[in-house]
Image: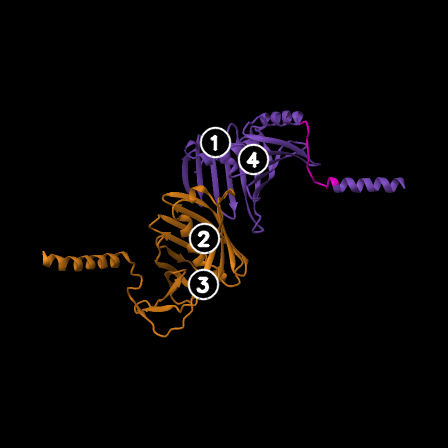
Chain colours: A purple, B orange
Amino acid sequence: MRAINISFLLLLFRFAYPQGAFVEIGDAGKLKSEIKKHSEEVNSIKSDFVQEKNLSMLQEIVTSQGRFLFRKPGDIRWGYSKPYEYVIVVADGKFRISNEGKISEFDIGSNQMFRQISDMIVMAISGDFVDSEEFDISFFENADFYLAELKPHARQIADMLSAIKIYFDKTSLDVKKLKFIEPGDDYTLIIFKNYQKNMDLKDSEFIFN
Amino acid sequence: MELFGKIFPKALLFGMLLCIASCSPNYLKDFKLLNNSDLKIPTIFNHDFQKSLYKAKLTIRGRELSGVLIVKRINKSGFRIVFMSEIGLKYFDFGIEYGGEEFMARTYYIMPVLNRGEARDILINDFSLLLSDFKANRKPVVYRSAESKRIAVEYNYNGQVYICFRQSGSDRIGAVKWKSRAGGRSGINIGSFPDGIPSGIEITNKKYSLFLKLQLIEQ
């Protein structure tokens, strides 16, 4: 009878907290400190990524893939190789875009939207957001990940994104997934693969030849 | 004075006619009317078309947006057209539903920077034409060029007149020109048709400095 009761409780627990389900962390002070420390220790990142754009009403996922490079303080190379060739480089206060081989250049300050997107990507991937006052931040966890959910205050960002979800590996605190959720439930999920950090990234990686 | 009173209205009328004639495009300069033709206009997208993904570049008044554009059939008579940046930021999301001769368009989302002037209406009208199955009640007027042997089909759509030009040696449409449109005339050029889907589409609207180029990447 007792064994049946325990089984029943386990079953109930499984339904209440299904595998993979996230539970909010009440006091996230320790986790915030750990993420901040990890962010300070990471000077560069090199990772492949798969991007899934989920168009909920269309029941359609548009998948692309490429490679991401980051070097402190804010150099980025975000390159797509499939199904199209498209590379964004952010360095020296400039946005440079290579679109199917055609290169164009903008000042970061000249385009508010570009600057916001750039800042958000750097912030999310480097983990440098815990003290940000631009978002309401909540922390969750499951067996594999810590999850930080950021809800923007600024209306200009909130019109584009209702939330950003950042998934950290529980052991290494490396960012494994990013989810940009739009008003209306469409979202962009970026999954990082072959993630490497603190390697020497040359200047040539952040320029177009 | 009396002479002026007689000549002036005629001169004014002549001037107006000249102006209308010079402003109106003469797409059918070398074409002659084919009487009693029962030629139908072939659809640009196949009847069994489901979806296609295009690399897209939209230029409006010098401002360039690039990304991918997905066209998807959502039911027997309806389509969704979504244009988004390479990094996934949505620019616009239109729905087009056909019912008889008219179409219904719905804007699910449009980025504020695009929601100015006539850009939205131009894009919706041109996509509605591209995706149309041309089942109108009105009989098309058919022309043939004596020189190039090209066929042109003039049609009426939502009260506006457009002309489809067939590709040489094919029953596929190679270009579409609006003959009259309050929102500015667009010209649409269509590339080859691998598996019944256009491999490339170019929409040009000079009046609003709008140019959209699509290159098929997936279907």
* Residue bearing the label numbered 3: B101
Residue at 58% x, 48% y is A56
Asked if labels 3 and 4 share a chain, the reply is no
Which of the marked residues, 4 or 1, is nearer the chain's N terminus?
A: 4
Numbered mark located on residue B215 in the image: 2
- Badge 2 amino acid: Gln
Q: CA distance from mark 3 to mark 2?
A: 29 Å
For disc 2, the chain is B
Residue A179 in sight in this render: yes
Magenta span has A157?
no
Q: CA distance from mark 3 to mark 1?
A: 59 Å
Q: Nearer the viewer, residue A46 or A37?
A: A37
Foreground disc of the pair 4, 1: 4
Relative to residue B48, is residue A102 depicted above or below?
A: above
Asked if labels 3 and 2 share a chain, the reply is yes
Q: CA distance from mark 3 to mark 4?
A: 55 Å
Rendered location of residue A24, percent (x, y) = 68, 33
Label 3 sits on a secondary structure element that is loop
Give neighbour class at mark 4: few <14, some 14-19, many 20+ (Cα, 10 Å): many
For disc 3, the chain is B
Give neighbour class at mark 2: few <14, some 14-19, many 20+ (Cα, 10 Å): some
Label 1 sits on a secondary structure element that is helix
Q: Which residues are magenta?
A: A16-27
* Residue bearing the label numbered 4: A46
